[in-house]
């Protein structure tokens, strides 16, 4: 995964890559947990092609192949033609929100104060229960 990190870091420094608008400030291109990978970028064809190029390079070098049955792309704010193009480029299934990841609901909507407190309480409870075992 260190090699994939370096590939994605290199990709993010290229002039033909743009961060997802919510990730630009942090320069966040991806999150990895165990064998799960989330990649973030601006939803335009040239940026998606750059991500796929990076993933294909990683596959060629490491011989690790993504499970296409478990791979999704989440697309928002583009027209239907662009959405179809992005699906064709990636070969991924179209994902829909909300999703559950690591037991938590994930959605592009901003959480309100109450939802944040509920999330903190849930995480705190999981940590405390984990330490009690």
Image: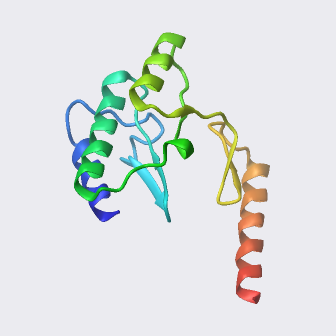
Which of the image's four quarters has the N terminus? Answer: bottom left
Viewer-proximal residue, 110 or 87? Answer: 87
Q: Quadrant of residue 91?
A: top left
Q: Residue at x 50, y 65 (%)?
A: 34
Q: Residue at x 55, y 33 (%)?
A: 93
Viewer-proximal residue, 13 or 59? Answer: 59
For residue 83, above or below residue 61: above
Question: How was this image coloured?
Answer: rainbow
Q: Residue at x 43, y 23 (%)?
A: 88
Residue 87 picture location, percent across and down: 47, 25
Q: Is 22 situated left or right of 25 in this image?
A: right
Q: Quadrant of residue 112?
A: top right
Residue 66 picture location, percent across and down: 43, 49
Q: Residue at x 70, y 76 (%)?
A: 127
Residue 67 picture location, percent across and down: 48, 48
Q: Is 35 situated left or right of 62 in this image?
A: right
Q: Is 1 situated left or right of 96 in this image?
A: left
Viewer-proximal residue, 114 or 91? Answer: 91
Residue 123 picture location, percent across and down: 71, 67
Viewer-proximal residue, 111 or 86? Answer: 86
Q: Quadrant of residue 119?
A: bottom right
For residue 41, above or below residue 2: above
Q: Is 22 situated left or right of 48 in this image?
A: right
For residue 42, above or below residue 110: above
Which of the image's four quarters has the C terminus? Answer: bottom right
Q: Do we see residue 12 in this rendering?
A: no
């Amino acid at each position: 995964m260190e090699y994939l990190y370096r590939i994605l870091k290199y990709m993010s420094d290229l002039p033909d890559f743009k961060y997802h608008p919510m990730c630009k400030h942090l320069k966040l291109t991806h999150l990895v947990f165990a064998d799960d990978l989330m990649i973030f970028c601006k939803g335009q064809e040239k940026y998606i092609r750059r991500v796929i190029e990076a993933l294909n390079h990683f596959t060629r070098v490491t011989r690790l192949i993504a499970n296409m049955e478990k791979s999704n792309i989440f697309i928002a704010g583009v027209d239907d033609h662009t959405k179809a193009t992005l699906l064709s480029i990636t070969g991924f299934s179209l994902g829909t929100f909300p999703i559950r990841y690591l037991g938590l609901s994930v959605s592009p909507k901003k959480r309100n104060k109450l939802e944040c407190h509920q999330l903190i309480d849930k995480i705190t409870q999981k940590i405390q229960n984990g330490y009690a075992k």
